[in-house]
């Protein structure tokens, strides 16, 4: 066994070094997402947004061609982040090709990128690969990113992983950032309750059972 | 071809003759539901509840053993129907074996039963079969009823259908009760938007596109 | 064994007695269809349309709220049937509640209804059940009808079957109407080749192999 | 709506009129079962056995060719029912063709048959159809019966249902026989806890939460 | 409970009254079959053929357009039944529309039809429905019949069942015809061993274990 | 975190350095493809071809044994690329073993290979691995490549990825080559509309909504 | 071919150097597990526990917030390891952030970590990554770890593998530790028999067959 | 782009340097295989065996505990390789721990190992990892190796790949060894025809079509 300490093996999210990129969650493009059931996908995206907001992570919104069939940004995201930088790209498919977008990322001074978007192999993979090439740590939120089918999803995820991206989920992002429940039990519990029906049920069962004694 | 008119072939829901029975959607029992993904199931149940409320259908809530592992009624349902009859059954597994429950149904004077519950083959099937036996028309909301797996679900649905039940979904119930969009376009559209992410996207895309002209 | 002849057991499609109803295949509503993969569903719908055209079946188009989020009729259908009755319903959810629509059906003088639409449990099931109640034979083209998921599809199909509908597919409709390949080998073969990739491959392989001798 | 009372619509299990038939759950034949995952199938079969024992239902065991590749009866079943009639059929494929077996059924004086076995389309379907033909009510425990794949299962279940069988599950059988939790809360709860991991978890969570107050 | 004896509830196959119809298992058409995996489908079809041969059932082969892209009858079937009536239909899509085919069926004097073919909703369903209409008992071998997908298969099977067909599998056909293993243990065992890998393994394990004592 | 810039992490497609290889999309071999539904697979292959044509990428066609059961190249591909090099290999299974094929690739002077074919683990994997070994960047279009089942597909894709291939889809290839919608909105939009039914619907809904204002 | 010997390629479990970590298998959290069927998951977890016990591996139990909705440790695990270190973490989400937990691991002096838990991407992945970073060999028991769905599971497993973890199953762990059946045929056979129904059937068939000679 | 030639990227099978290891395909153990349908798995294993025989590859058979519930080697394999080394291991779980087995491998003088077995994560993975550690190239035939479910399969395959194994299929092995159809068209075509029903159909269709000219 290798006895050496490899402190780089665990790329660990740090709430003081992470920025969230939500790419092209637009009302039209969402109809292309066929690898995750719609109720579940909507919940995952909003959960990730709530995680970003809960941890006060700088968050950057971007869309492609809002004034066309792609449709506007999902209104809920705009409401959650009314003050976030919002770059409506005039044409660049890879958000990282948009100078304003990259400038917004760099302005945060953060080096860990949490990214999700539609569709996975384009709107997520291209900026993720670009950012990896520039030395960022990239965390792909796989369950808040959608695409046409399992084949296109797996191909996109494997391509990003091969380039060094960390594959994760909105729930893992929340846990990794929070570190310790004692930092805020109510806050994190509420967040989970709002986005995990099974967890909400556990809480409600627990409250009743505790009271029934 | 049979030329005769069979006016009885289409059992058609009528908002003046329908009553909704929500059976055992309890926080504990919901963890048993494994034939529908949790986000989707939660949405379906709340959608059916909103349909009932929207059409002012008399609605009856019932639970089994709230003060035990089955857990309390899902709080959202209680909030949507604060004034509905709520029969916490002391032990009867088939809600129809509970006199108070049957009395509540009969008190509505209605003859069309819309029913959903957990788990399908017990909490839905038993009262559905009992009601059919007493001459009610029964509409099983299959996507707001949950059970262990596909085999138990299909067996339960086939048993009820063989006895004369109509298999339907919350969306079909809404459409069948509403009859004509002109009765209230905004109301029904809002209901659909709240529970069908794809439909909400259509609306938001439409609003943007209309405005962009 | 029952020896009696039951000529009514086989409801057999007859090209001189059939009319095709295409209900609410609208560009917006199609994003709700999640029980069939999009490429496959598009092909099935256009294949049914081509079958209707090939057999010169009277065909009736109808939509619900074209001027809204539901979107317009899929343009390809309008192009295939430029002269077909096209009833843009002002609000009726069940097309059979629209007098103009029923009048169009009755004007054909036909008693066999071939129906497909979006979504299955509403736009197909309601008029299908209404038509059954008035003595029509109803053939539901299950693979050209779409809905949210397997549960809602199966519930809708079982409800219609229980009321007497025949469940069929676009390919079976074509075969049942054609009766004998000798009526037009090239025509039916072309239709199949255009909508069944495997069949097109068979033909191309055959042509090459025959020529290679 | 049909107002008439149809007391025959609900074939309801009665613990004083039911007999359980466990057909050919043999160690060899179980390797043929591919439509249910093995851990789940084993649990379902033993759960049904425990239900039979719990309600003191007369239970009849039968096997086909124990002294050959089909293998012996699953030992657990023999242990649960050490005194049950056990008919090792010398050759009859349909257990109902075995006079001793039918005699054992008739000796119980019961008219409701609860049946499960391996494989569904043969060892369950044949005696089920025979019994229906002789006027018995037949309840097929679909999740305690196994076969090669979904197609063979569904075909078998539909054949039996068309002949009048009730499709049910071991959990529904338990609920239908018990009628009222108050008859024995601990007993039924223990049975469920032993065979439904999710239910056991609910109980353990409840106990802890109640105690934690 | 209904006490009456309904001897007609169990349509039971009888080897002296059954005829097997294998419809359009052609090398080209088989590429259309996408609802069953090819190795499995090939095995099921050949297993049914071996069952027919084993029980000396009169068997009728038919094809549609052999001299075209549909391709010839699968050679193995021709080899198994070198002397069977083989009707290469000149054009009739429903084999029952071919007088020679019907004459061949009637010449057998048998009233139970066992049928399988490609594709299910056309080549099986049409003659099955025609035969039912003429008073035959029809047994559809669902796992030896193939079609495009699950939706088309289920629609076809439900249509046939609604008209009175019995849904079965090749294995159930074998068991129902054989009635008693003692009629020929080796013969039936060999047949199963040749077509059920799990059963062959059971036999080989048994032989070894018996010898190892 | 690694701060270094790794410009090699993102292998980015460049329309001036890419060549497309379409390997063995033959009418016979396509019947072997069972891991993607036929309508979807046909669409994916033609979409990739249209992408190649749209970007004027040099494209090379090759087949194996056209004059035999493998069948000819799918005619649509020949029509899209009437002037492309077309190497009908006399026997080499790995196209890269064919000198004429490799010469055609080298003649383009390009170093990025976009490859798709049938079947994935042979006709795609072998030349892809060979090209990687010679220093080419290889982009495997996973959804335009087909094989027997998920196991063989995943094994093939993992083998290629482990050797350095980029896994991608036809849609990602289009987006990566185009870089900016402003280069040609109509052109790319039309391409997407022709091959993504959901996208065509978005466009048609948008046009109608914009006009309806 | 590389001829060099790479003794480090096979990270091989050694029963004298392995420690088992069971993380957060709590009665509440188990309701979140939706990627493995409950009967199967329960069996896998208990099987891993029995393996740990059988090989006398030091085993460490830990939970997060037992006195809340997460619920207590599954009682069966506590019973199997009554004397094992049991760290009820006061708040740390990553067990490796808990000093007592890490101390317990280090106290064993072992360098191979076998880990399983709920949910995979948090309770397993975080400590696994931390341990890899400190030079431990980590073996993830994938089938005794559960999470929300396939996407979150695969993302978590790929993240761990990319950091050097070995992906394995409880059965592989048992085989890799045992090395040679002759070390204890009865013991290992019993363990397998208790947790693999198919294996139990093999044994019972074998015993009967051996005896029948 | 990296311009360097990396001749090591493509580990290419060579019929003069490959040896085939078939590990524990025993009649009992096969009942444990649940990740591939039995007809398909049997075919894949026999296809690999036929490939080995066709290319005259040295082949080594091994089993574990034949004289017990694991059962004997599948007889067909013994028949195909009557003269192959056959090591019935007395107890070693990892075949590579058996000196006789390793000696047999080394006696072939070959450095490329083609391996398949039951179950994948033990009988395949252990010797594969051991062989990789000793400098062999290892090719895992994933579709001729079976295990309990998708999770255990994928974990095993990823573990082997991470250690450098090539994942492949029996069909890819055949193609990679054969290199050029002209080496023997009839031989390879026959092999494919015997194990790929779709390919056999292509050949039969081709023969008929060619003759029909």
Image (spheres, coloured by chain):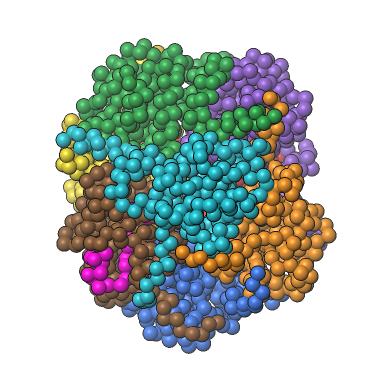
Chain colours: A yellow, B brown, C blue, D cyan, E orange, F red, G green, H purple
Image-based side of F26 in relation to H80, left or right: left
Where residue H93 sits in the image (x, y, percent)?
57, 21
Where residue E178 sits in the image (x, y, percent)?
70, 53
Q: Which sits in the foreground, H126 or E169? A: E169
Q: Which sits in the foreground, E69 or D25? A: D25
Quarter of the image holding residue C206?
bottom right
Q: Which sits in the foreground, B179 or F149? A: B179
Q: Is residue A23 magenta?
A: no
| Vertical relation: B27 (above or below) C49 | above
| Residue at image point 40% right, 40% down | D195
| Residue at image point 48% right, 47% down | D58
| Residue at image point 53% right, 35% down | D75
Where residue F29 sits in the image (x, y, percent)?
66, 50
| Magenta segment | B102-120
Q: Quadrant of the C terminus of chain G?
A: top right
Q: Is residue B108 magenta?
A: yes
Where residue B151 sits in the image (x, y, percent)?
46, 52
Residue G166 visible, this orientation: yes
Q: Quadrant of the N terminus of chain G?
A: top right
């Amino acid at each position: 066994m290798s006895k050496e300490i490899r402190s780089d093996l665990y790329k660990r999210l740090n709430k003081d070094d992470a920025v969230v990129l939500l790419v092209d969650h637009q009302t039209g493009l969402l109809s292309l997402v066929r690898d995750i059931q719609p109720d579940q996908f909507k919940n995952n995206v909003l959960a990730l947004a709530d995680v970003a907001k809960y941890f006060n992570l700088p968050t950057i919104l971007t869309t492609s061609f809002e004034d066309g069939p792609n449709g506007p940004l999902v209104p809920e995201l705009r409401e959650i982040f009314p003050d976030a930088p919002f770059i409506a790209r005039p044409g660049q498919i890879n958000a990282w090709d948009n100078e304003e977008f990259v400038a917004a990322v760099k302005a945060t001074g953060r080096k860990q990128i949490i990214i999700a978007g539609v569709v996975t192999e384009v709107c997520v993979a291209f900026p993720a690969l670009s950012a990896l090439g520039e030395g960022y740590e990239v965390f792909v939120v796989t369950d808040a990113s959608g695409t046409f089918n399992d084949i296109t999803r797996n191909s996109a995820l494997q391509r990003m992983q091969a380039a060094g991206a960390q594959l994760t989920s909105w729930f893992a992002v929340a846990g990794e950032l929070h570190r310790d429940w004692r930092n805020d039990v109510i806050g994190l519990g509420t967040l989970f309750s709002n986005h995990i029906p099974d967890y909400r049920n556990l809480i409600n069962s627990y409250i009743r059972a505790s009271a029934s004694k």
